[in-house]
Image (cartoon, helix red, strand yellow):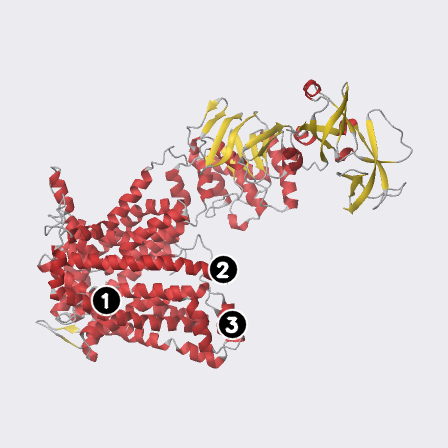
Amino acid sequence: MRKTGIKFDLSWIYVWLVILFLLFPLLSILFLSFSKTIYLEFPPSLFSIQWYKDMVHNRRLLNSFFVSLRIAIPATLLASFLGTLAALASRNFGRKLSNASHILFVAPLIVPYIILATGMSRLAILIGIRGMPAITLAHATIALPYVFLLVNSGLQLLPESVEEAARVLGAGQFTAVWKVTLPLIRPHIFVATMFAFIASFGEFIIAYILSTPYATTLTVYIYGSIRDRQEPSISALLTLITVAVLFIGLFYARYYPVQQRRQRVQI
Amino acid sequence: MADVEVRNISKAFDSVEAVKNLSFHVRTGEFLSLLGPSGCGKTTTLRIIAGLEQQDRGEVLIDGKEISNIPVHKRDIGFVFQNYALFPHMTVKENIEFGLKMKGVSKNSFDRKVIDILALVGLEGYEDRMPRQLSGGEQQRVALCRTLVLNPRVLLLDEPLSNLDAKLRKRMRIELKNIQREIKVTAVYVTHDQEEALSMSDRIVVTNRGEAVQIGTPYDIYEKPVSRFVADFMGQVNLYQGKIVEKTGSEITISSNQTPDVKSLLTSEVDRRDYKEGVEVLFLIRKEGIKVLHKEVKERADADSFVAEVQAVAYLGSHSEYICTFQAKKGQIIFRSPATSEDSELPGRGDKVRLGWKLSDVVLVGKVK
Amino acid sequence: MEALRCSSSGEGKVRNTNHGVGLMWRTKERFIGGSLTLPASILIIFFWVIPLIILLVFSFFKVVPGGGFIPVFTFENYAKIFTDPFYLTILYRTLILAIVVTILALIIGYPVAYKLARVNPRKASFFLVLIIVPFLTAVIFRAFGLIYVLGNRGVINSFLRYIGVGGIKLIWNWTGVVIGFLNTLLPYAILSLYSCITQVDRSLEEAAYTLGANKLRTTWHVVLPLIKSGIGTGAIFVFAIVMGTFEVPAILGGMRSGIVESVLIQQQIAFVHYPMASALSFILLLVVATVVAILMKILGGEIKL
């Protein structure tokens, strides 16, 4: 359609507004972490690193962070390993079995976690696990679909002939997958791992219901703190976490597209 | 029905000039083609007329009124896209009705109009089909119906036949032209196929790299190209460069290292003024005018003849194509001859033949700068 | 974001996975290979299927007044939910909330998705990254941040007071909850719409313009019908997540906002009315499944996951 002569365009303002809206919480956390006051006011009174200092001394906060890690890392590893296996193995299946397994592996994504949490709590009592092991297993379960879907989509992009060529050249079943297929879907596995980690690290409701005084994740801690007290030191920790995530994301973003392009050229 | 004028239109995309100072005028009811190689700005120009692009400079006028400030949907111009752009989620009928709906025409008349317009293109009974069920040619015609049912003042067509196979294209050419003539709508047609342009247009605008190189009737464009580009593009194969060495009244003699000295006629006042002895010119010999002469034919004042050697003969079924060279000259001359002949033998490779043509078959294209 | 792929008006089913590889492997290999799905299956069956079964079973147990329950089969939990106005109101409110958020997310997100779909991909990916970045942080982190934005002593209100206008109540109420959800879920809506709009040929819109339709009418008659599956995917994601998310209403709405999940938690923690909690969960599940099924029916197309 006709546009105005200048670059100035109303619709871009709208886009920026929406994006700003989406980024607002993160930005406010950032500003809060450097704020001199407990609240984030306008005009903002910066600049202070008191909350970062507080954070370092905040035993319980830091503990919850490590609990989150100690749950998320095993959960991610478990989900990534099992999910990749499942994706690779389900290539073998015929139509019916393939659809069925698809549904099974994607199911945890569809049902709200709160329902799962309610059921899990009962199961945990029944089989006598509690706290961190219980949460870890539950998180692995909900992370599995992400891994399965992402690795699967990576496998679909692969031309079948590459693995077949390896077999023809004498590689056994395991070797062919290990040396040929896996390296080719490495970026997909990496992204899947990232998603799995995020799913576990940021999960609240399951961690809340299954929590014990010792097994309190960061998300549960934040929830408690909101209800009970003002704790801006949380914002310091969150800022650091977000920055770390951004760095990892950026690092990977530069790595990933190049991989893809090289793949296409070679194949 | 309206006339369209495009004045000094320029448009650049990211520092690439797509259209440079283009001007032309389409008369009411005329079929004008924008002809040129791909990427030379003709589609851009068409889209500017439609309002899908905005020109950087220049005016677009319909019936003498500037329309550049009128948005696309109010311009009342029909546009047929290269990929037809039929709405895939609507039936043929709904596609055609779309414009009527937008205009606010009363729903009662829809059925009648749809039936009539489908009949015009020979697609009776297609109302309830979906676009994906139609062949290329059928989609093409539905796209046409969609615009024509609105009685637009101007019809713009963006290479509408280029996605069809050759045989269908030839048929559709005739159909399109007939429809245009019957409805008498002013049409601007973009194509890169010179056969299409020649057969359908009242006038042609030949464009190259965004500029209008020649505007004229198909006859003018083909027989009297004004530049090497136009001559080349239209398929003139016997193009040479030489110098005028003699001028006697209207008759000139051109000397070149590609052909023996040929004679030509200066037909217009302008030509008689411009072309003098010593001028370097670009000229062509019409391949349609070249004939193989038999010994009995005697010399004429308005014709020329030379001996040439046949280098290659290509049998093409309906005719044969000959490539010959002149002794001690660098150029080739190409012409066609009937493939079979009852009375005499056909020349073959290596034979020497006498070629003849009228002086009027030697056409001056222009001066060499 | 393969999960948000769409198919345009009725073409293409999910392509089958690598059958060539499967057929090439010998039968013994196929068996071994296939069995590698077992560990994953076991995990899911144990920690997903079984909990749900337990939930189902418990939902039919009888609640003992005063605390606890006895393993007697009864429908009374479900009956109570459907007759007690307290529970009905909660379900109703949750449903309305989910519907409102879904509609808002789609309406607000559409112009963004459209704009990004119509500029060159490199420019678009810059903005898409900006949209995805919040995804990488947990919902609760963002809710935490929103408190400081929407709260009474937060950014917006102190700004309004600064310029002389009074404060507005943006938190501990439905407004806060809706804003919180939109903040979390707009990216879902935008991305699923975006991936569909990019597949709509621009010439279709241009054709509509030349036929006399302005931008709005073109959107309504041409674009929207063609992105039905994108709308459906977005709607399903948003709806299901709203129905199942606790953090946002709990934090931004205050415990008094009365949404299903809050009640679930209260009963859960009380550990008294576990069967009730179970029954409520299943009703919730049923509602979500029903709405999703209806959505998929209406929009008629295929929504690839």
User: Vertically, is B30 above or below C18?
Assistant: above
Tags 3 and 2 on a common chain? yes
Q: Earlier in the sequence, mark 3 or mark 1?
A: 1
Q: Type of residue at label 3? A: Glu
Q: Are marks 3 and 2 in contact (CB under 8 Å)?
A: no
Q: Residue at (78%, 29%) from the top-left corner?
A: B262
Q: Type of residue at label 2? A: Val
Tags 1 and 2 on a common chain? yes
Q: Chain of mark 1?
A: A
Q: CA distance from mark 3 to mark 2?
A: 19 Å
**Quadrant in which residue A227 is drawn:** bottom left
Q: Type of residue at label 1? A: Ile
User: Vertically, is A263 above or below B267?
Assistant: below
Q: Nearer the viewer, residue C133 or B158?
A: C133
Query: Which residue in the protein does label 3 denote?
Result: A164
Picture coordinates of residue A181 (x, y %)? 44, 70
Q: Nearer the viewer, residue C183 or B54?
A: B54
Looking at this view, name the residue that lies furthest to the bottom: C28
Q: Residues within 10 Å of mark 3 (few under 14, many from 20)?
A: some
Query: Which residue in the protein does label 2 denote?
Result: A265
